[in-house]
Amino acid sequence: MTGLDLISELYGDAEATLVYDVHTATPAGTQRTAEHFRLRGGKISEILLIFDAAPWQPMASVIR
């Protein structure tokens, strides 16, 4: 990761969603990402990370 640009922050009583671009020094380049947090008892109880994995597939085949 070489940088991060926050695009949006959305908040609810027991949840939050962040949308951001992750800049990498890989062939995948910049990755648009969304992260959804659920809160329980004032603490993060669940994190869901959403992104398009397709740009990472060529690099994954090299690791195998």
Image: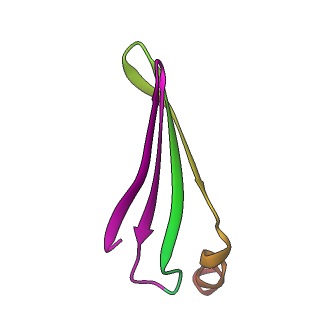
Q: Dividing the picture into quarters, in which one does residue 1 lie?
A: bottom left
Give the percent coordinates (x, y) of residue 31.
51, 69
Give the percent coordinates (x, y) of residue 2.
31, 74
Question: Which of the two residues, 44 or 31, is positioned nearer the viewer here?
Answer: 31
Give above or below for 2 relative to 26: above
Q: Dividing the picture into quarters, in which one does residue 58 lie?
A: bottom right
Rendered image coloring scheme: rainbow
The residue lying furthest to the top in this view is 41
Number of numbered callouts drawn: 0
Question: Which of the two residues, 25 or 19, is positioned nearer the viewer here?
Answer: 19
Question: Which of the two residues, 6 or 29, is positioned nearer the viewer here?
Answer: 6
Residue at 62% x, 77% y is 55
Residue at 66% x, 78% y is 57
Give above or below for 8 relative to 2: above
Residue at 51% x, 87% y is 27
Residue 16 is inside the magenta segment: yes
The residue lying furthest to the left in this view is 2
Question: Which of the two residues, 38 or 62, is positioned nearer the viewer here?
Answer: 38
Q: Can you say which quadrant of the picture contains the C terminus?
A: bottom right
Residue at 52% x, 58% y is 33
Residue 21 is inside the magenta segment: yes
Give the percent coordinates (x, y) of residue 52.
64, 65
Give the percent coordinates (x, y) of residue 49.
55, 49
Give the main secondary structure of the magenta stretch.
Answer: strand
Q: Magenta residues, as a range?
A: 1-26
